[in-house]
Image (cartoon, grey):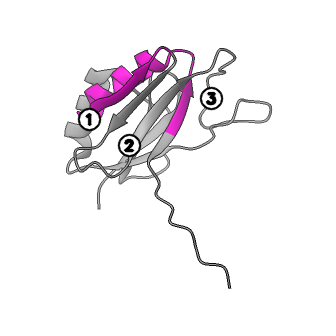
Amino acid sequence: MVDKPRMTLTATVLGASDARALAAFYQRLLGWAVKQEEPDWVTLRAPDGVAGLSFQTEPAYVRPTWPAGPGDQQMMMHLDIEVDSLDTAGAHAVAAGATLAEHQPQDDVRVYLDPAGHPFCLWTR
């Protein structure tokens, strides 16, 4: 039997036409610190230091459409962010540079788009 190797998820990576601009948005939104910054790569780390978000410049980046229809650029993933208040957190997200998505599929979730078009969800229990 082969031993299971130790694996630790360190970050989720979001592509964008400008990694630094998108990282700056998420830094405003989440309040996380920059841990690594290069011309085309930025990593933010959560205060608990467990996992973070990284941002990579992709010259051929195509903004996703949400919800996507036939032939539209699909999102590859989205972030779920638990909040205490949808209204308060939503106002903060918009002030940081997010846009409220036109389509809202659930009452206890609000879908926003970051400046590069990636959807993310604010949700409450």
Of all residues, the one furthest to the front in this rendering is 2
| Whole-percent x, y for residue 94 in the image | 31, 25
Of all residues, the one furthest to the bottom in this rendering is 1
Q: Residue at x 48, y 20 (%)?
A: 19
Local packing at callout 2 (Cα closer than 10 Å; few below 14, some 14-19, many 20+) is many
Judge from the rendering whether residue 112 lies leftward or rightward of residue 28; answer left or right: right
Boundaries of the magenta span: 13-39
The reply to whether the C-beta atoms of the residues labelled 2 and 1 are less than 8 Å apart is: yes
Per the rendering, the mark at residue 56 is none
Q: What amino acid is at disc 2?
A: Gly
Q: Residue at x 50, y 48 (%)?
A: 105
Where, quadrant-wise, is the C terminus in this rendering? bottom left
Q: Residue at x 47, y 54 (%)?
A: 9
Per the rendering, the mark at residue 64 is 3
Judge from the rendering whether residue 65 lies leftward or rightward of residue 27; answer left or right: right
Q: Earlier in the sequence, mark 1 or mark 3?
A: 1
User: Would you place residue 6 above or below residue 94 in this image?
Assistant: below
Q: Which residue is mark 2?
A: 52
Q: What amino acid is at disc 1?
A: Trp
Q: Secondary structure at mark 1?
A: loop
State yes or no: residue 38 in magenta: yes
Q: Earlier in the sequence, mark 3 or mark 2?
A: 2
Q: Which residue is mark 1?
A: 32
